[in-house]
Structure formats: C-alpha cells, structure tokens
Amino acid sequence: MNPSGAVRSKLLRPLAMALTPSSSPYSATLGSIVSRRNFASSSSDEVLTIETSVPFTSHKCEPPSRSVQTTPKELMGFFQDMALMRRMEIAADSLYKAKLIRGFCHLYDGQEAVAVGMEAAITRKDCIITAYRDHCIYLGRGGTLVESFAELMGRTGGCSKGKGGSMHFYKKENGFYGGHGIVGAQIPLGCGLAFGQKYTKDETVTFTLYGDGAANQGQLFEALNIAALWDLPAILVCENNHYGMGTAEWRAAKSPAYYKRGDYVPGLKVDGMDVLAVKQACLFAKEHALKNGPIILEMDTYRYHGHSMSDPGSTYRTRDEISGVRQERDPLERVRKLILGNDIATVAELKDIEKQAKKEVDEAIAKAKESPMPDPSGLFSDVYVKGYGTEAFGADRKEVKSVLP
Amino acid sequence: MRSITMVQKLGKVLTNTRRFSSANSISSKPINLFSAINQALDLALDTDPRSYIFGEDVRFGGVFRCTMGLADKYGKHRVFNTPLCEQGIVGFGIGLAAMGNRAIAEIQFADYIFPAFDQIVNEAAKFRYRSGNQFNCGGLTVRAPYGAVGHGGHYHSQSPEAFFCHVPGLKVVIPRGPKQAKGLLLSCIRDPNPIVFFEPKWLYRLAVEEVPEDDYMFPLSQAEVIREGSDITLVGWGAQLQVMEQACVDAAQEGISCELIDLRTLVPWDKETVEASVRKTGRLLVSHEAPITGGFGAEISASIVERCFLRLEAPIARVCGLDTPFPLVFEPFYMPTKNKILDAIKATVNY
C-alpha cells in the first residue's frame, strides 16, 4: 500500500521543477521558460511561447510539444475567467452555509484551469458534458453568473429554470450538455453525442468529463469500446482530483494511471493545474479525435473544497497537502506569475481584476435573489412534452389525469 | 362519524410480534437510527465470522456513519471500501454470498442503486430458481438509504422500493425507526434470501429511541399494528410512518380513530394483518413517498379490494408522491404530507 506521504509528494510535484528563478518577486520561477520578446511594447495579440509545467506523458500516441503559444490577451482572459470562477465557488460556499442553496453542492475551486484551458482550445460547436461538479464548466461555456446563482438558489432565472439546482446546469445553445448526478452515467451519453457528431460531419468533437471516482465504473469501459470501435470523435477527460469522495485514488484503482486505462485507446496525462498545458492537450486531442477516434486526457488536478458541502475535505487528506497544492500548483497563481513575469500587467492591475470579480459575483447574487421562486405548477411541467403525458392535479394533488396525443 | 365506539380487537399478529422480540427485559439506551444500524452490523460481524461489509467509503464509517468503528474492530478484510461501482459491489456480493458467506453490501444512496439493478434483479433474485436450488445468494443483504431529506434534490431523495417489489426472489424490508432497524436488519442479514434493505435517511439522526443492546431480531413478512383504531386503517413503511402518525393524532382530535400499520417487509408482505385490520375498520389508506403510479400502494390496494370488497365502505385512498421526478425546490409540494393524509382520512371516512 502506498504510504500517504508518497501520494502527497506526487500531488505536490512542484512547478519549480521546470522553472528557474528570475528577478521579479512575482515571477520568481517563470522568467527563463518564456521566450521573451519586447515586452515594453508588447501588444495584446503578440504571440508568446511558454513551456508547460511538466512534459506530457502519453499512452499509444506521440505527445504534443511542451511549448504552448499564447498571447498577453489570452493570459489576461485566463486570469479573469479563473478569478471569476474562484470567486463564484467561494460565494456558493457561503450561500450554502446560509441555507440559500439547498440540495447537494459540489465546488470546483482548484480545478479551474481544466474548464478554462479546455474552452481556449475548442469552439462552442464542440460539446461538453460533465458530472455534478458543473458550475464552472457552465460559466466557461458562456453561462452567466446571474443564471448560475439563480439556479443554485432554485429561482426561475436559473439556467434550468431553477428545477435542476447545483448538479444540473445546462446551456444547449453553447453545446453544454450539462451536469449529471449519477457518477459515470454521463460517459456513455457523451459518447452518444460524439456518435451524433460523426453523422453531422461538421468537424466537431465532444469532451466528456468524469472524475477519478467514475473512472472505475463499468459504463466507462463499455462506452470506450464502442467509441473506439466506431472511431467516434470522443474525448474522455478524466479530471483526476485524486479523491473519489473520501477515497484516495490508489485505494480505489489498481492503476491510477487513468490515461492508460483505455488500453487500446490512446491517452495523455496533463498537468490540469496548468491552463496552458490543458489548452495544448485539448487542441491536440481534438485534432486526434477527428482523425483517429477517441482519446483519454487525464487532467492531474485538485479540489480545494471537500467532495460536497457535507464533506469538510480534511479527514482523508492533510491540511498540509491542501495548502501545499495551493502554494505550489494553484492554477490562478500560475497565470498570475506568467502575467507578471512577462510584464503584461502589474500586481495592482491583477488585484483590481480580482476585486472586479468579487463585485460582479456580489451583484449577480443580489440580482439572482430578485428572481422569483418557480410557480408550483412548474412541478408538473417538463415531465413529458406538454399535453402528451400524465399530470397530477387537484387540491391534494393526488388525482392523476393522463393525456394522450 | 361512525365506529368510534366499536370494540377494538387486537390483531393476532401484534401479540406475535411482541413475543418474537425478547428485547423487553434487556438493558436499552436511547440511540439514533444510524447507531442502531451500526449496532446491528456490529452484532452481525461478531456472531458470524463469515460476514463481510463493503461499499463506497464504508471503511471510514460511510457517509451516514453507519459503519463507524467496524473496520477498526473487525479488520479491513471484513469491513472494506470498494471502488465507486455499484454493479460491481452487488455482483461481488452475490458471488461472496454464493460461497456461503454473509455479504452485506452498501449502496451509498438508493438513487445510485440502478447501475446494480441488473445484478439484483437478474442475478441475485433468480439464482436459486434457475439453478433448481443448487445455488443461491441468500447471504446477500443490500443496504441503501432511501427517501427525502428536505433538500436532497433529484438524486439523493428517491424511494425506489417498488422496482424491487416486482421481483420474485427478493425481499424488500424498510424499518421505521432505530429499534426496528436493528431487529429487522439482523433478520435480513441472517435470512437465507437476498434482501434489499432500505434505510430512511431522513431519520438517521432525527429518530432517537430506546434500543435494546442485545442481539434481537424482528420477524420478516410480519406487519405491526403500531396504533390501534376503528374507523380507518392506514398502511405505510419507513419514514412515512412518522408523518402518518401525526395525521392519526390530528384525526383523533376530530373524532376519527385510525389504525396505523407498519408493513415493515414489503415483499413478501403480510396481507393477513392488513386484511384483518380493514375487515375491522372498513377503510384503507396507503401512503408512500414514491410516485403514486405503480407504487407499492397500488399492489396493497388491489389485494385488499380482492379480499375485502364487500367490507369496504369507501374507495381505498392512496396518498403518495406525485408522478414527477423527485423535485428540488418543489419538494414540499411533492411530498405526501400530514395535511394531505388528514384530508384523505376525512374524505374516506365521510365517503
């Protein structure tokens, strides 16, 4: 059995490994890997080439290059998006504790680089489907803060009319097929989306996200076989945050090398805390999937919160481990260092962005609170197509009427 | 309002039930439902060295603390975590039980039991029948928390008992409180048939009562009359009984005498006790959280009409969950609440 120390050291694989110090206190580790151009006159569209924190590890495919192209504009966008996501999740935590959010609530803070890096590589015609840790994926797909908070609080202004709650965010027009409650159940569904895309021939792919817990569900392997058999443009993204609820990955998986678990399906292990690595991997995966069929991306990531709101998240892992990841691998801090190291913005400017994020979140919450609770009649709608099914009605709501087409 | 002066007859079963439990003379302590489950599991492990408990996170006590301390006491080879795969959990349980062991499998929420549905329905339930009694998995007990908790939403609130009641070869048991849970769970674990045991998760912490500390069992397939009355019979199980009990109290204030029956075992169920009660009262109301259509209340209703047609003085009332997915914000509307039951009691009695 692995001693927990071994697990910890793996989680804490330091950024510094690939980096060397430079002069600025904020870019302590990033200077040398950035191919520096003339920053003083850097325009926001200038191309920067930045190396990923660690090399990609691949299974049955040639890994993409560690050198990722980006622009100051993109990096600022990453920072903004991740700061907003982080703030949203922290606010959701307070709202839950204030009992304004009911139901089960799973927070994404720590994993933001996966949502943001993935979006940077794909279009809104590509599909994304995920499990129940879905708030930030939704935001990444172009969802709004107000709709997020309204949904969390069960208001009509929510992205699922308040009927879904935390685990069931959707945004059809932007290819977000949503949050799914049952562990692993979204995987075959995601491969089905890719099956549909195979017919439409519009060069789009589906990213199916699942966690390391779901990686042991039989459904994954059934879906993988079909996806590989039929060369579907399916990208299976294992967001490995190393704990399936309270169970460490090595306690649940004979092989926690999830990128290899597809056997005949190629895989790539990615530092999911490095938004540029995620972007590079997703670009690579999309190209691969359109040409060759499915691929697994294992995103090595970390959730700061517990599994859900009833899990303090500190009984099965040490506080040192959590704070260690925060200090050494935090996705937001990594981008902050890149921005400062390349003189794209100042410390104060980034602080302002974070303050702005807080302001936007607070405003969105206030606005979401104004959204009314759904009308009780909403209980009966959307069960079937209107007028084509069974409705219950009556004062005691126990009478049932069936309506046939 | 009639029959309130009718002589109350004690059901035969009621006395049987009391005799079966030797609990009354032994010391008891007030504990909650999850502690009672924990005691039962402890006893099961202690009394049978070939019993095993497994499921997601159970080694650490499980999300509802039902298996707290058991891994420390009996070792990680008898109380262990499984990967997150319900189909595997039940399948392995069947195999373990088929080798003569007592396999006590936990599915973390009843809502997650469906990946294991095939294993339970096609493998566990029919193993004995299709092998001509050469094989069985009678040692298998699948435990799963079911039902509403006030804010559980779509996938932490469902009551899927009726699906399993449709499967000959399985038993389905649901306790109403700590004392019942301990006695019934021990019976289930020791019963030579595969059993699905649903635990009312709303009551895990909420329900506290005196629970005997010794090893005791309650009989399966025996309903219990928990409140005697003469005007109408109410049948329910699990957490719903608390709601029904309140409705009985309110009805009594309006002069209606309700007899409340805890079915305890849903399959095979104790028709005789319900029949005897309905013959006495002439009226029946069934209540459960699961949606009304195809719920187990429908089965009870049909059976009692067959047996008591000429004795019934009103249509059988069903106060159940609505035919919608289990809702999030609409939970209060969905639930078969005390007032809905009270309305139905009055309507039935005044029919």
Image (cartoon, coloured by chain):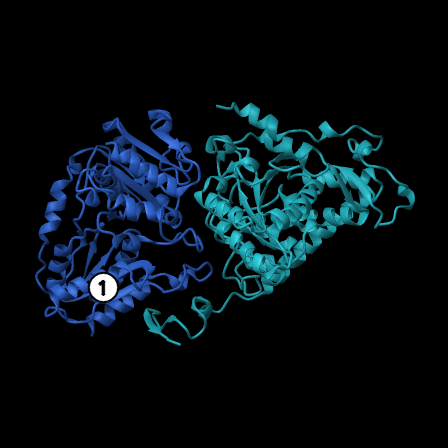
Chain colours: A cyan, B blue
Q: Nearer the viewer, residue A27 or A294?
A: A294
Q: Image height check: is A363 above or below A330? A: below
**B86 relative to A266 in the view: left or right:** left
Question: Residue drawn at (52%, 62%), measured in percent from left and top?
Answer: A162
Q: Nearer the viewer, residue A190 or A210?
A: A190
Question: Which residue carries the number 1 mark?
Answer: B285
Q: Nearer the viewer, residue A22 or A256?
A: A256
Q: Image height check: is A381 above or below B13? A: below
What kind of residue is marked 1?
Leu
Q: Is residue B277 visible?
A: yes
Element at label 1? strand
Q: Give the position of the N terminus of chain B as an image quadrant.
A: bottom left
Question: Residue drawn at (46%, 33%), measured in percent from left and top?
Answer: A252
Q: Is residue B203 visible?
A: no
Crowding around mark 1 (Cα neighbors within 10 Å: few <14, some 14 to 19, many 20+) is many
Q: Can you give x and y, in whole percent of width and height, for residue A338 in the image?
A: 78, 39
Q: Can you give x and y, in whole percent of width and height, for residue A5 in the image?
A: 56, 23
Q: Give the position of the C terminus of chain B as an image quadrant.
A: bottom left
Q: Can you give x and y, in whole percent of width and height, for residue A330 in the image?
A: 67, 37
**A46 relative to A283 in the view: left or right:** right
Q: Can you give x and y, in whole percent of width and height, for residue B89 in the image?
A: 37, 39
Q: How many numbered circles does the render carry?
A: 1
Q: Chain of mark 1?
A: B
Q: Quadrant of residue B218?
A: top left
Q: Image height check: is B163 above or below B65? A: below
Q: Quadrant of residue B249?
A: bottom left
